[in-house]
Amino acid sequence: MADPNADPVGAFIPGPRLRLAGRGAANLPLAGLTFGAKDLFDVAGHVTGCGNPDWRRTHPPATGTAPAVQALLDAGATLVGKTKTQELAYGLTGENPWEGTPTNPAAPERFPGGSSCGSAAAVAAGLCDVSLGTDTGGSVRIPASYCGIFGIRPSHGAVSLAGVMPMAPSFDTVGWFARDAATLARLGDVLLAEGALGGRSLGGNGRGGNGLGGNGAAPALGPLVAVSNAWDNADAETEAALRPALKALEAAFGPALSLTLPWSGAQLYEAFRCAQGAEAWTTLGPWVERTSPAFGPGVQERFLAAKALPAEKAAAGRAVRAVVAGRMRGLLGGGAVLVYPTAPGPAPLLGADAHTQQAVRERIIANTAIAGLAGLCEVSLPAGKAGGAPVGLSLVAAPGQDRALLALARAAAGLLGL
Amino acid sequence: MADPNADPVGAFIPGPRLRLAGRGAANLPLAGLTFGAKDLFDVAGHVTGCGNPDWRRTHPPATGTAPAVQALLDAGATLVGKTKTQELAYGLTGENPWEGTPTNPAAPERFPGGSSCGSAAAVAAGLCDVSLGTDTGGSVRIPASYCGIFGIRPSHGAVSLAGVMPMAPSFDTVGWFARDAATLARLGDVLLAEGALGGRSLGGNGRGGNGLGGNGAAPALGPLVAVSNAWDNADAETEAALRPALKALEAAFGPALSLTLPWSGAQLYEAFRCAQGAEAWTTLGPWVERTSPAFGPGVQERFLAAKALPAEKAAAGRAVRAVVAGRMRGLLGGGAVLVYPTAPGPAPLLGADAHTQQAVRERIIANTAIAGLAGLCEVSLPAGKAGGAPVGLSLVAAPGQDRALLALARAAAGLLGL
């Protein structure tokens, strides 16, 4: 890029761009890569703004740098800016009234998706090679799907959350974006080595297996399992856009099994909303109460709902979560890979009213809560377009299978010509 | 029993009953139990008849005793007779024109099921406590279902096949029958310790976990996964008879996931028929060619079809098998347990014509080939009645999970009041 401060899509937070050169050795694994970091990640000496001016005003500069950021720097990548986030990561549209909603480079008339909106927009617009985001309920997967790029929500606990604003800690993950699957996997080689799960990954989690293929030898991952609930939840155009990608994967890897979960989308949404909401209020409520911050659309409502959440609803949500997690981990523990649309449709139009946005949110979470409730790892691939806008196809695997899943995503991207 | 030679259902082979007292110590695990052994198992000094007079005529007495038989004797059980088999184990009805078809004690107007017909009938009639059979395509599971008792086809390779007539070696297994799940599991403790898989069973394969239940701790087995293909393949009355059992298990273990396999029943049948037929001809064809034996209904036809099988059909069957095995092992490797009707219906009536029998056979194998092709372990529980005759419900787990599956079957039997 000619102007290193250029930001045609408004992906970075306002003000001077925060730059940190990575270590200079040319043989480092991420040498030459540029990255953005969602403004939920600490960088020493800078306030982590979390997308909200009242938060920025009431917090001191960070005293350390988040290990995930440091890991990329140490691997040779250069930080080229903090990227916008929906306030306190509590939203899936990416709207931010204070800093300006980033433009979706792939569909400018639509939301970029959130909460990691700036990280997705920056990568989609080519302003940096990769970026860090966080994903609690879909905040990497959804903007990846909406902006037509690759994104991963790793297994819960696979990448350190130190130095990252906690939202709902038992759901929070550090995820990342890239424009191609190979680069997505390169970051995995660096970040997953830092993670809590790094030392106890599953047997098939090595770098060798790209899953599902091979003659005779036990595959690292497989079989493919299409989740009918999530396919049925997609709108017709999205389903039609992504079905050929599934067919292409089946042609290479063999026909997928078809799975129907015993929970409705509404049940999954409600369980997620309550379990997450209770945690979010525990984590962020004290600051909200103390500060009475101004919030943009939807965020205020979600915090109010979280505050008002009856304890028994939160407990019921956690109970459903435990059941879903047990079932899904058992189902996927042998290497099976779920496949379904990341989101039920493309990004909503920027003019969508609050009611529409809420309806979209509930339908999204019916899909994203599968991995979210169960702590699974999920990669979204930019596999199609619906209404002229991108829609992602997700591959989802058991906790700890992150590297194998990234390798599988590379193979899938190759097959799909992505 | 007053008369130890009584055989009101014709379960044992004609002639003097072969008896071998087990070791006498009262503290042995199977002390006091009586058992029958299908006449496919060698007992030193006796001809293994395999259900066919020409076979008996052309084979010398066995020089050793099959390790599976010896293991029961060593564990304190007493052999009380060789039980009838459909000729060369090549059938699922249990019909035997030379020795007489055993009566199905639970439905005398119907076939007992085969090929381990005598073993099932003897246990169902209370003539012995347990019995050994073999299962290549369903030969334990089907008579267990038809006679209303418990039966297990263990993982391929889990119990030694030494001293047992080979039929289609890559499918053959040693299975067993009991009238209650606890006794079925007791035999597992003895037989599985002898098996090739004994030393490398899966993590969850211990005696402790009875699967699926528990609060918080990772279950030994789970989740339950209902295979819709196999449920849809069942006749309406069988489905209705077994659905309440599934509901009861779901009430205890949580709702089952629903899985649709990407292969039709006809595809599974054809793959099994061809892969098994080619092996059966390789194994038994030389004797058939040399001897030109007289065979009962169906057996002759199946050997002729096996002989005529084009090599490319056998190869295609093996290719499907490899795909099914890879998919199912991946799907079940995390502990998932499939649940579906053992057979599509109760035993056919004794008067059923050849065309009906063949149609029934094809529908049966659509269900039994799931475990058969993939080498899975399967327990059939006598969970219902259809048309006044027993029908079994199967629980099916990954290779090597035999002990955990037997423990789960005990828990399930308790829940179902069996």
Image (spheres, coloured by chain):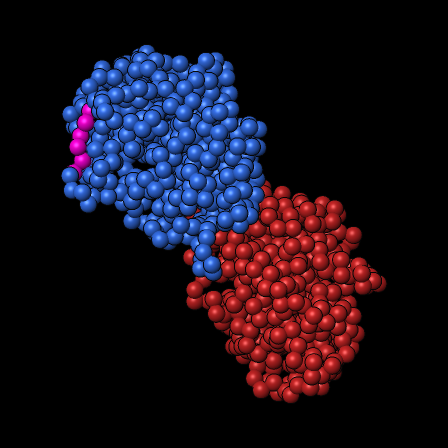
Chain colours: A red, B blue
| Residue A325, above or below A71 | above
Position of the C terminus of chain B, as image quadrant, is top left
Q: Is residue B22 in the magenta section?
A: yes
Please name whichever residue, B220 or B157, is drawn nearer the observer in this view of the structure.
B220
In the shown orientation, is residue A48 left or right of residue B396? right
| Residue A178, above or below B291 | below
- Residue at figure coordinates x 25%, y 36% from the top left: B33
- Residue at figure coordinates x 63%, y 63% from the top left: A313
- Residue at figure coordinates x 24%, y 43% from the top left: B29
Please name whichever residue, A395 or B218, is drawn nearer the observer in this view of the structure.
B218
- Residue at figure coordinates x 77%, y 73% from the top left: A296
Please name whichever residue, B219 or A37, is drawn nearer the observer in this view of the structure.
B219
Predominant SS of the magenta segment:
loop
Where does the image place residue A249, in percent across and percent down from the top left?
Answer: 59, 46
Q: Is residue A207 visible?
A: no
Range of magenta residues: B18-23
In the shown orientation, is residue B28 left or right of residue B340? left
Where does the image place residue A295, in percent across and percent down from the top left?
Answer: 76, 76
Q: Is residue A342 in the magenta section?
A: no
Where does the image place residue A196, in percent across and percent down from the top left?
Answer: 48, 70
